Image (cartoon, helix red, strand yellow):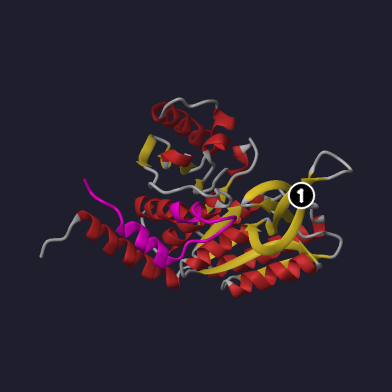
C-alpha cells in the first residue's frame, strides 16, 4: 500500500495526540480573567472627543497562565494550574471557566490582592481600549504557592512557567531548581529583557520582538541562529523557540538552528494568546512523548487555528488533525 508523506505525518500526529490523554502538565504563573465588552459606536461624547460605546454584549475568558492551561486541556492532557488570585468575583469566575475547560485550578487566595483582569472594549471586532486591573500578590502567598508547587512536582510529567510579570513567578529560579532536581523538563514563556531569570530551563519561547529586544535586530535567520546560540550558552538554557509571526517559528540550540517551521497559510483574525497556544501545545506534546520537531510542528498548526478566532482561544485535537491533513507535500 502506498502512503503519501502527508498521510504518514497525519498518522504520526494522531498517535502523539492520542498519548496526550495520559500526560500531566503543571502550569504555574500569572492567571488572569479576560473580559470583552462588545457594542456599537454611533456618536462622539459631548464631554470629550472620544467615541461612545453602546454595550450590547459581553464575554469572559481565561487569560494569561489560565489560557495556557486551557490550551493544554483542549489537547486532552491533564493540566494542573497554580496561581495567586484575589478572593473576589473575578477569581470565582476564572475558577469556573477553568473547571469547565477541564483544568484543575489550585489557587492561593489573597484577600488583599485583586485578581488580574484585562477589560477590552470592542466595536465591530475592532479593539477600542484595554483597561487593566492588577496588583502584586503578598510575599506570604508567594511562599505558599511555592510549597504547593513542590508538592505537585511529584505527580507531573513536565512543568510550564507562564510569566506575565504579575509577581507569581517572583522566585522562578527556585522553581526551576526544584523541577530539575526531579528530572523534569521546564518550559518558560519569558517576560522582560532579563532572560537569565530562566537559567536552567529546558526551553524558553519568546516571540521575535521579545528576542530582538534582548539580542538586537536579526535581519536574517542566520543572524538569529548565531545570536540564539550565544544567548543559550550564557543563560544555560537548552532550547529557544522563537515565534516569527507570518514566518512561522524557529527552534535553536547551543549549536544554532535546529529547524525552521514555516507558517501555515491562513487568514489572521486576532493574535491574542497565540503564544500561550504555542507553549501549551509544545508542553503537552513533549509530556506525551513527542520529539521536539513533532511538538513544534503540532504547535504551529494549533497557532494557525487560534489566530483565526477572536480573542484568546484554544485549538482542539480534532481541529489540529484537520489542519494537518490539509498539508501538501511538494
The answer to whether residue 82 shows anywhere in this view is: yes
Residue 154: quadrant of the picture: bottom right
Q: Is residue 31 above or below residue 74?
A: above
Residue at image coords 53%, 33%: 234
**Residue 245 x/y as whole percent:** 48, 41
- The magenta-colored residue range is 304-330
Residue 315 belongs to the span the image colors magenta = yes
Q: Which residue is mark 1?
A: 131
**199 sits to left or right of 265:** right
Residue 87 belongs to the span the image colors magenta = no
**Residue 304 x/y as whole percent:** 44, 52
- Given residues 275 and 57, the one toward you in this image is 57
Q: In this view, which residue lies farthest toward the left?
A: 1
- Given residues 133 and 232, the one toward you in this image is 133
**135 sits to left or right of 242:** right
Q: In this view, which residue lies farthest toward the front?
A: 42
Q: Is residue 100 above or below residue 163?
A: below
The crowding category of the residue bearing disc 1, from other C-alpha atoms within 10 Å (few below 14, some 14 to 19, many at least 20), is few
**Residue 201 x/y as whole percent:** 53, 48
Residue at image coords 63%, 64%: 150
Residue at image coords 65%, 39%: 192
**Residue 161 x/y as whole percent:** 59, 54
Q: Is residue 28 above or below residue 215?
A: below
Residue 193: quadrant of the picture: top right
Residue 229: quadrant of the picture: top left
Q: In this view, which residue lies farthest toward the right?
A: 47
Amino acid at each position: 500500500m502506498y502512503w503519501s508523506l502527508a498521510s504518514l505525518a497525519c498518522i504520526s500526529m494522531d498517535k502523539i495526540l492520542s498519548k496526550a490523554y495520559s500526560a500531566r502538565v503543571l502550569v504555574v504563573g500569572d492567571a488572569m480573567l479576560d473580559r470583552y465588552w462588545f457594542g456599537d459606536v454611533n456618536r462622539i461624547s459631548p464631554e470629550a472627543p472620544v467615541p461612545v460605546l453602546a454595550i450590547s454584549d459581553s464575554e469572559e475568558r481565561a487569560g494569561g497562565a489560565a489560557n495556557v492551561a486551557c490550551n493544554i486541556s483542549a489537547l486532552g492532557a491533564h493540566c494542573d494550574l497554580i496561581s495567586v488570585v484575589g478572593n473576589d468575583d473575578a477569581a470565582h469566575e476564572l475558577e469556573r471557566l477553568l473547571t469547565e475547560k477541564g483544568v484543575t485550578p489550585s489557587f492561593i487566595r489573597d484577600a488583599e490582592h485583586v485578581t488580574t483582569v484585562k477589560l477590552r472594549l470592542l466595536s465591530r471586532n475592532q479593539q477600542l481600549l484595554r483597561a487593566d486591573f492588577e496588583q502584586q500578590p503578598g510575599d506570604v502567598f508567594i511562599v505558599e504557592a511555592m510549597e504547593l508547587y513542590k508538592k505537585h512536582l511529584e505527580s507531573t510529567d513536565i512543568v510550564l512557567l507562564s510569566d506575565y510579570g504579575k509577581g507569581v513567578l517572583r522566585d522562578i529560579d527556585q522553581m526551576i531548581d526544584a523541577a530539575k532536581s526531579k528530572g523534569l523538563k521546564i518550559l518558560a514563556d519569558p517576560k522582560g529583557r532579563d532572560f537569565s531569570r530562566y537559567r536552567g530551563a529546558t526551553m524558553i519561547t519568546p516571540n521575535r520582538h521579545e528576542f530582538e529586544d534582548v539580542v538586537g535586530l536579526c535581519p536574517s535567520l542566520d543572524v538569529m541562529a548565531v545570536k540564539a546560540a550565544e544567548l543559550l550558552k550564557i543563560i544555560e538554557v537548552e532550547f529557544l523557540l522563537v515565534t516569527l509571526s507570518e514566518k512561522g517559528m524557529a527552534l535553536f540550540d547551543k549549536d544554532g538552528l535546529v529547524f525552521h517551521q514555516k507558517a501555515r497559510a491562513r487568514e489572521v483574525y486576532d493574535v491574542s494568546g497565540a503564544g500561550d497556544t504555542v507553549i501549551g501545545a509544545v508542553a503537552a506534546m513533549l509530556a506525551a512523548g513527542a520529539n521536539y520537531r513533532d511538538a513544534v510542528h503540532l504547535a504551529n498548526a494549533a497557532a494557525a487555528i487560534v489566530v483565526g478566532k477572536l480573542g484568546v482561544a484554544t485549538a482542539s485535537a480534532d481541529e489540529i488533525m484537520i489542519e494537518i491533513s490539509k498539508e501538501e507535500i511538494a
